[in-house]
Amino acid sequence: MKHKYLKNVSTLKLKSDKCTGCGKCIEVCPHSVFVMKEGKSEIKDKDSCMECGACAKNCPFNAIDVKAGVGCAYAIIMSKLTGTEPTCGCSDDSCC
């Protein structure tokens, strides 16, 4: 099952001008957020990004920016403010 997180909240950004197509982001991303197109990485599904930071930490060319860990934190904060259950897309056993 493909995990989805909160829509349009991921902080993930790819600077295509810095990408050399090494594929490290594709290799380390646990949710297949990236694909290779025309010799460079491209964000395929930003809403599947769980903001773990693995892509940015492993990119040798600093082509990726992401504020690691803010997705689930945002869901928890919003649930407290709205009185609802957190919905960050994680399984019940691993988060929230």
Image: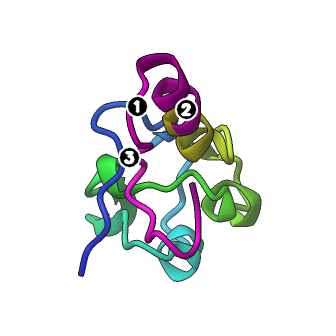
Q: Is residue 10 magenta?
A: no
Residue located beneath label 2 in the image: 74
**Dot 1: element:** loop
| Residue sitting at x 67%, y 47% | 69
Residue 18 visible at all: yes
Q: Position of residue 68 (x, y in %)?
A: 68, 46
What is the crowding at mark 1: few (fewer than 14 residues within 10 Å), some, or many (at least 20)? few
**Dot 3: element:** loop
- Residues at circles 1 and 3 in contact by the CB criterion of under 8 Å: no
Judging depth in this view, the residue of 17 and 91 nearest the camera is 91
Q: CA distance from mark 2 to mark 1?
A: 9 Å
What is the crowding at mark 2: few (fewer than 14 residues within 10 Å), some, or many (at least 20)? some
Amino acid type for the residue under numbered disc 1: Val
Residue located beneath label 1 in the image: 9
Q: CA distance from mark 2 to mark 3?
A: 9 Å
Q: Which residues make up the magenta segment? A: 76-96
Q: Image quadrant of residue 57?
A: bottom right
Q: Image quadrant of residue 34?
A: bottom left
Amino acid type for the residue under numbered disc 3: Thr
In the picture shown, does residue 45 fall above or below 76? below
Q: Would you say 69 lies left or right of 94 here?
A: right
Q: Would you say 32 lies left or right of 19 here?
A: left
